[in-house]
Image (tube, coloured by chain):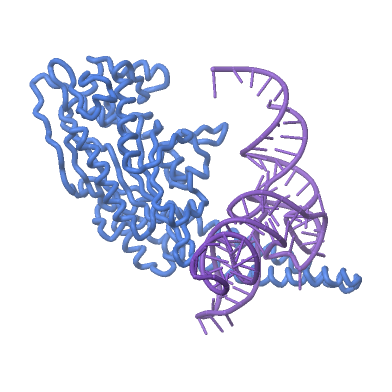
Amino acid sequence: MLQISFIRQHTDLVKERLGTRYFGELSIVDKVVELDEQVRKLKVETETLQAEMNSSSKEIGLLMGKGERALAEEKKQQVALHKTYLQALNEQLSNAEKQLHDELIKLPNLPHNSVKKGKTPEENEVVREGGNVPVLGAGAVPHWDLIKQYDLVDFETGAKLTGSGFPLYKGKGAKLQRALVQYFLEYNTAAGYTEYLPPLMVNEASAYGTGQLPDKEGQMYHVTTDGLYLIPTAEVPVTNIYRDEIIKENDLPVKMTAYTPCFRREAGSFGSDVRGLNRVHQFDKVEIIQLVHPGESYIVLESMVAHVEQLLKSLELPYRVLRLCGGDMGFTSALTYDFEVYSAAQQKWLEVSSVSNFESFQTNRMKIRFKDGGGKTQLLHSLNGSSLALPRIVASLLENNQTPTGINLPGVLHPYFGASSI
RNA sequence: GGAGACUUGUCCGAGUGGUUGAAGGAGCACGCCUGGAAAGUGUGUAUAGGGGUAACUCUAUCAAGGGUUCGAAUCCCUUAGUCUCCGCCA
């Protein structure tokens, strides 16, 4: 959520920045400014009246103490009159506040100055590429065929147990998941991230904190009986660890990593996008999250990008780094880099990581703050990135490394997988 | 799932209707003392929001939400959480 004081002071800048995402409802900004003015006016009125009543109540207390009951009674009636008026005012105020809040949460984050104006993924900028695209032999097949051939994932039985898009990993396929998770976590903790294993369901407040609610409600599985949501990413529970906390400046930066299954409804997806492991409802992912001093968040963003890039390099996969244009960025992000790996048999780039700086958009909702040198509390900046999402990594590992005699795994995985090939 | 006890500031802890945003202590910060430190001692030490150039001031917050009252940390209701006992259970 954007800070109202910022919008108040930089209304035009806010509109201009939102323009880079082609945000269609700039009138909301004006509405917000107007509502804010209303709220503040009502606040002054309400609080003045409240102050009057408070001091009257104190006087009544004193009069009672002195035994001047008659005077006290008189005063009481006066205050009682004010009370009705105050109730009406309060109602107006809370209405206005609610309206303001409802409008405010419709505004997405302001893209960073460097973010290019753009509407579609085609307008994303390829920052750099790495790794080598392998030349596959004549009989090369996509990963869904390899999965069948080596009996790694049983999609049909997964569909029987739950529904389509819920893979049942099996044998070496299951073990490869475990090996990847283990490797990714070790890699992250070696870089100073603290490992967490969070709950896989969150309450409404948490889902709201990171921005899934109210915006992406339809994307989450909702356990209505208990009012809980299955997490779409570890970002939700892990970032919320520090909700409503003031962190000591000495404890910064906070670096956290977590492996969790992720659950996404992915309503509206179809076609080759959802074939095999390309897009599923439940998948495994290791996430990195940082809470940092606002002055450092862009340096940290670059370091997180480098961290993920190094990890992809170690897997010996062909990859590219994209800098998203305004229109393709998530609602809560100020600047996002996407990582894609090349899946050689499908001849397709697959997104495997998204590293973003949210600046104070999430921390403002969650009230995650620190005390600066001058003793002032300020919002921190939050960042996160996948390191990495497993299914598409697996797809590309399988496709790119297939040989007539088996699938060769990159060296870094050998100790975790317990073998050098499938 | 049933019964009971509880939830106060960074922490411990007092407070059962009236100058209580909240005693006391610990911690922390700054100062004095000291050759330096410890001890001692003095002062300060919540958050959010509003008004004001500023000094400052007002409002809200004692788990959350609602109610009673002129007035609530204190009384009532609802919800959440913690603990104890019983039940069930990997």
Q: Residue at x 44, y 46 (%)?
A: A210
**Does the image show residue A287?**
yes
Q: Residue at x 36, y 20 (%)?
A: A168
| Residue B69 to residue A130: above or below | below
Instruction: Point out residue A199 in the picture as x, y percentages from the top left corner.
Output: 48, 34
Q: Is residue A176 left or right of residue B17?
A: left
Instruction: Point out residue B12 in the picture as x, y percentages from the top left corner.
Output: 66, 49
Location of the C terminus of chain A by quadrant is: top left
| Residue A101 to residue A220: above or below | below
Q: Residue at x 31, y 26 (%)?
A: A179
Q: Is residue B26 left or right of residue A59?
A: left
**Colour used to depict chain B in the structure image:** purple
Q: Is residue A1 left or right of residue A40?
A: left
- Which is nearer the eye, A242 or A89? A242
- Which is nearer the eye, A56 or A409? A409
Location of the N terminus of chain A by quadrant is: bottom left
- Which is nearer the eye, B1 or A218? B1
Give the quarter of the image for residue B45: bottom right
Total number of numbered discs in the rendering: 0
| Residue A34 to residue A224: above or below | below
**Colour used to depict chain A in the structure image:** blue
Instruction: Point out residue A102 in the picture as x, y percentages from the top left corner.
Output: 50, 54
**Does the image show residue A35?**
no
Q: Residue at x 51, y 56 (%)?
A: A101
Give the quarter of the image for residue A404: top left
Q: Is residue A284 left or right of residue A90?
A: left
